[in-house]
Every structure is written in C-alpha cells, then in structure tokens.
Image (cartoon, helix red, strand yellow):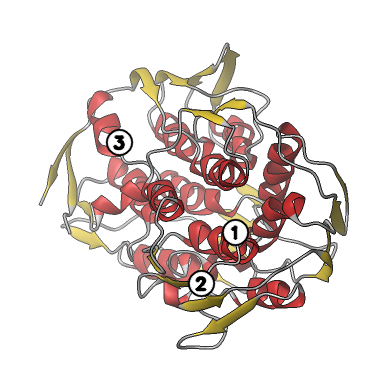
Amino acid sequence: MATLKITALPDVLNGSVLLPASKSISNRVLIIKALQSDIQVENLSDAEDTVLLQQALANNDEEIYLGNAGTAMRFLLAYYTIRGAKKTLKGSPQMHERPIGILVDALHQLGAKINYLEKENYPPLSLSPSQIHGGEIYIDAGISSQYISALMLIAPNLPEGLKINWPKEKVSASYIKMTAALLQYFGASFNMHEDGININFATYQGKSILIESDWSSAAYMYAMVALMPGSDILLKGLGENSIQGDAAIATYLESFGVASVYLKNEVHIQSKGIYPEKFYANLIHTPDLIPTLVCLCVALEIPFKIEGISTLKYKETNRAEALKVELAKLGVSIICTENTMYYEGGAMLCTKEVILHTYSDHRLVMSFFLLAIKNQNILIDGVAHVNKSFPAFLNTISHLDFKYLTL
C-alpha cells in the first residue's frame, strides 16, 4: 500500500472543492430504497462503504463479503432479517474484530435466527430464514449508534411497528437524529424521546432525494484552512441546516480563526490565523471529528482535553490507541483514559523522515495529513484507504496545489 509524502505546499489555499456525498446519508437511503423501490436518489456517495452496500443489495448470492464496511454490516444484518433471507455475512479481519452482539441480541428478541460462525459477538454471521413482526426491545446505546439506526430503518416495515428503548446516556446521538430525519422525510411515523423511539408500521413514501455533501470530509478542509492563515476556499454541496452532526466542525473551528459564510448549497470558509490557548470539547456524539481535531491541535501545539472518546476503540481500529502510538513517534505525548484524551502541548520532534502507520483507517490517513503539512518529514502509509469515505482526496489536495509523492 502506497505511502504519501508531501513535497511542496501552497502559500495559502484558494479555490473551490467539490466534496464527496455523505456516505452516512447514502447508506441509510440505500436501505430505505431497498424497502421502497419508488425512490430516486441523486448524488449517491462513491465511497467504498456505499459501493459495497449497494453491491450487496443487488447481490442474490448467499454469501456476502463487506470488507471493512461496518455500517453496511450492521444495516444489512437488520435488513436481511426482515427479508427472511438465508445469508452469510463476512468481512475483513478488522471487521471480524468489531462487535455486533448488541444488534444480534436485539434482533433475537424480535425472533430473528442469527448464528456466530467464529467468535461470539463478532462477525462472520449466518442468517436463517425467519419472520419478525416487531414489538418492543431494550438496547445498549453505549457502543455504537449504528445498532439503533439499523433497527430504526427496518421498523416501518414491521407489522407491529417497533418500540426501541435505550439508556438516556447514548453515544453518537447525532447519527440517530440523522436516521430519524430521513425516516421523517420518507413518511415514517414515530415518536422519539430522550430514552427511546416508538416507530409505527407505515410504508415509506416514494420520493426523490439529493444527498448533501459530507461534513466529515469537510472537516479536513476546515483544518487545512486553519493551518494556513489567509486561506479562502469554497466547499460545495454543504448547507447550514444539515442533518449531519459533523457539521459541528464549523463551530469548533471558529475558535481556530476559521469563519464560515453560508451561501446557496455551499459554504465559504476563510482563515485569520487566530488560535485558542487551549481546546476543550466533548465529542461523544461526533466521534469521527476526534482524529481531525487531535492532529490539528498537535500541529499547532495547542493543549487540549477531549472527552467522549470511549467509542474510538470500536472503529476501523482503536483510534485512541493509534493516535497515542503514532504521535509518540513524533515526540508528542498523548494521555488517554477510558473516556478522555489529553495533550499538554509541545512541538513535534521530527528532523528526519518518520512513517506514520494508519492501521487501514481512512480517518487516520486524512488526519495525519494535517501533521505532514506542518512537517514534510512525516510520511503517511496506507493512503489508498481514503477510498472508504473520500475517494477523491488526493485529487482534491492536488487541486489545492499540494505537491506530493506516493512511494
């Protein structure tokens, strides 16, 4: 897998960027479309996760391979149970280390027949034909919101509807809200409250939808602009009233001197090079922003305290541990507890080439790119993993006049 090395930087960033479509919205819409074929989708994501999900939905084979696409694994597991399908769901070795037992247990409560083929609570899985009608379940919401979203997406097709109860303290709540917004858009009837949601039996409405651009990908552009004062770029396909929780990056980056001006279906961002003395945030509901903000702060030597990191261990890799280990190669000390990450400041020590390992994780590749902007002795391995969410990342940085080699 290729290693990336920046060879030259632009003085500032100028121009416009066409961001990828949101894969989070795209993946949810694909499941809804599979349940209601009379839906027209524009600007579907070309991210690897979405492509794998789309291929799986079109695949009549009994065995389905999903690579490292966690959302696809979880959404399809729920989808195939209401289809009464006989399926085997497999993935990459990393996928087989990502827990799914909470969703399996919830589907078992509804009458689904699902078995583990290797390790308890983890893929691969086999599904036997079954009929589920709905009802009421309780689910642990402390590991992944995707379990809840998977159930929410199939709930309108259950004859008895579905009442999902969860603890008041849940993680990644912004993604549950995203799923609810899409259910509402496509005509589902539900009542959501602090500790659960009651979704009624109702047929999804056939409508068209234009998928908005991806705010998670926009976060890297915001951080690059913050690192390069005087930068002025236009991000296309984004709106001020997004259903994506990661739109919060615009608010967080205000304290880093990045101003956002919302136009029609795009946002104009500019950097003034004004930085906070310290950075604090609780990112329990937007965990995908954590690597971006960690690397931005380290690049700028800004001490931080970030809470809400407990779910990072369940991502493509243990992101908290990966950040700690790889940043230590640069002489940077990151302290991690179960739910908090600290950095007391201090410069990166990198006087000769250092390769940062990305553990097959797309978000680490793009976050480490921020460090490489500040020190071109930093090389980043596994650059092709950006295909998981932002296939055009390298083309985008080229368009912004970064020069680089892939070794």
Kind of residue at badge 1: Tyr
Q: Nearer the viewer, residue 258 or 168?
A: 168
- CA distance for labels 1 and 3: 30 Å
Q: Residue at x 60, y 35 (%)?
A: 247
Q: Quadrant of the N terminus?
A: bottom left
Q: Nearer the viewer, residue 310 or 214?
A: 214
Q: Is residue 178 left or right of residue 343?
A: right
SS class of the residue under badge 3? loop
In this rendering, which labeled residue sits more in front, label 1 or label 2? 2
Kind of residue at badge 2: Lys
Reading the image, the residue beneath label 2 is 86
Q: Residue at x 32, y 61 (%)?
A: 358
Q: Quadrant of residue 137?
A: bottom right
Residue 204's spot in the image, x, y percent? Answer: 71, 39
- CA distance for labels 1 and 2: 12 Å
Badge 1: few (under 14), some or many (20 or more) residues near its Cα, within 10 Å? many
In this rendering, which labeled residue sits more in front, label 3 or label 2? 2
- CA distance for labels 3 and 2: 36 Å
Reading the image, the residue beneath label 3 is 392
Q: Is residue 196 left or right of residue 388?
A: right
SS class of the residue under badge 2? loop
Task: Compare marks 3 and 2 and give the one earlier in the sequence.
Answer: 2
Residue 81: in sight, yes or no? yes
Badge 3: few (under 14), some or many (20 or more) residues near its Cα, within 10 Å? some
Reading the image, the residue beneath label 1 is 79
Residue 344: in sight, yes or no? no
Pointer 3 with pointer 2, Cβ within 8 A: no
Is 344 located above or below residue 176 in the figure? below
